[in-house]
Image: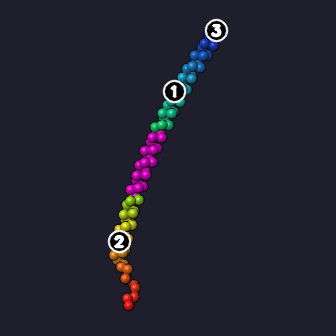
Amino acid sequence: MHWFPCFFLQNLKKDLSESEQKVRELIDLRRKDAVHMTKSAEATRAHLQGQLRNKEAENNRLTVQLRVQTPLSAGCAVD
């Protein structure tokens, strides 16, 4: 019966080592996911900023066009 505790301890050490390896792998995977999510968020932000700049430019062009087509004196009675 002396071999049982030794065998049992060896199995426990093996299981612990495997569990520690799995934890390291999960931590690494989580770190990689966080990096990917950060890059994805940055890309989305850049894309949305580009869309916003385009819409602002379009708005400015339309504002100028509207001012040219309808001068301030249009529709006003001149005395």
Per the model, the C-alpha gap separating discs 3 and 2 is 94 Å
Q: Amino acid at mark 1?
A: Gln
**Disc 1 crowd, CA 10 A, few/some/many (<14, 14-19, 20+):** few
Report the mark closest to the observer, 3 or 1: 1
Q: Residue furthest top?
A: 2
Stretch in magenta: 33-51
Label 2 element class:
helix
**Residue under the point 43% across and 44% down:** 39
Across and down, in percent, residue 32 comes to: 46, 37
Depth order, front residue of 45/25 = 45
Task: Indicate yes or no whether the magenta region holds residue 47.
Answer: yes
Task: Indicate yes or no whether the magenta region holds residue 77.
Answer: no
**Residue under the point 55% across and 20% down:** 14
Q: Quadrant of residue 76?
A: bottom left
Q: Residue furthest right?
A: 1
Q: Which residue is mark 2?
A: 64
Q: Which residue is mark 3?
A: 2
Label 1 element class:
helix
Q: Amino acid at mark 3?
A: His
Per the model, the C-alpha gap separating discs 2 and 1 is 65 Å
**Disc 2 crowd, CA 10 A, few/some/many (<14, 14-19, 20+):** few
